[in-house]
Amino acid sequence: MSPSDTLSPQVGVFGGTFDPPHWGHINLALSLMEAHQLQEVWFLPTSTNPHKKDRLHTSADHRLHMTELAVENVPNFFVRDVECQRGGISYTVDTLQELVDQEQQRPQPRQLRLLLGADAAHSLGQWRNPLKILQLAPPLIGHRPGTPIADIEKLPNELKSAILAGSTAIPIMDVSATRVRERLKNGLYCGHLVPAKILDYIEVHRLY
Ligand code: ATP
């Protein structure tokens, strides 16, 4: 258990473009949930990711629907569409502040934790106001056992320490949305990478 794990209940906040969502996302969130006894996980599809604004392949609406399909049968997984509702470019720090403010209205506010894949951890330094992000939702980062999180040496100490404190070895699945899109484009089978109901949705709406 990391030092920032507390006795108060915790909720994982998992942002992504989910373009489309795949088993790697579900596996990461579920593994971190079990490893840290998170009470819930909230999937947050970004409306326009500031780091990927020229590289989105489908509308926020489609990505939101696909993310809802991805989590609908997983206990304690929910979609929060704060970013899609807000529209425009979303900065994680603003979204987390909004979620923390909402949580403070509850009789027993829960501690938010930002869920990240190992490939996203080093980019935290380029996000808007990373130190504030650490305060609002200390990160939990899933990485492959035996493979430490890469490229974090040059990050400020506070950020590096928070990443190391939240780093969690989990069985990572070798899948990315990029690979899924490429396989779909080439007419290749994707049932081992993406839940069938999402593949049906992609077919019906002719995405990718
Ligand atoms: P793309 O290939 O389009 O860049 P992606 O598959 O990386 O997409 P995103 O929606 O950009 O998916 O990722 C959201 C989060 O999910 C990030 O924190 C990323 O590190 C994590 N993630 C993506 N794929 C995996 C995977 N296979 N295992 C663990 N985490 C993952």
Image (spheres, rainbow, N blue to C red):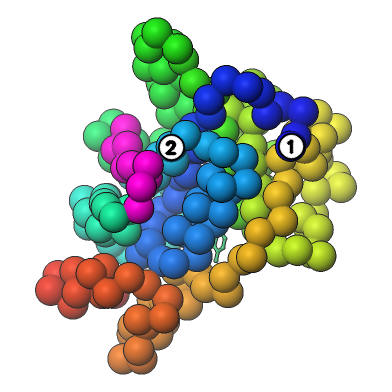
Could you tell me which residue is drawn at 57 percent across and 70 percent down?
173
Q: Does the magenta stretch include residue 76?
A: yes
From which residue to which does the magenta span run? 74-82
Q: Name the residue under label 2.
A: 40
Residue 79 falls left or right of residue 169:
left
Q: Where is residue 32 in the image (x, y as percent from the top left)?
A: 58, 48
Tell how many labels.
2
> Dot 2: few (<14), some (14–19), or many (≥20) neighbours within 10 Å?
some
Q: Nearer the viewer, residue 150 or 74?
A: 74
Q: Do the residues labelled 1 and 2 touch (CB within 8 Å)?
A: no
Q: What element carries label 2?
A: strand
Up the image or down, 44 lies above or below 144; here it is above
Residue 73 falls left or right of residue 100:
left
Q: Label 1 to label 2, Cα distance in Å?
A: 18 Å
Residue type at numbered disc 1: Met
Q: Which of 139 and 153 is in front in this view?
A: 139
Q: In which quarter of the image is residue 132?
A: top right
Q: Position of residue 180 (x, y in %)?
A: 41, 76
Q: Is residue 142 magenta?
A: no
Could you tell me which residue is drawn at 77 percent across and 55 percent down?
149
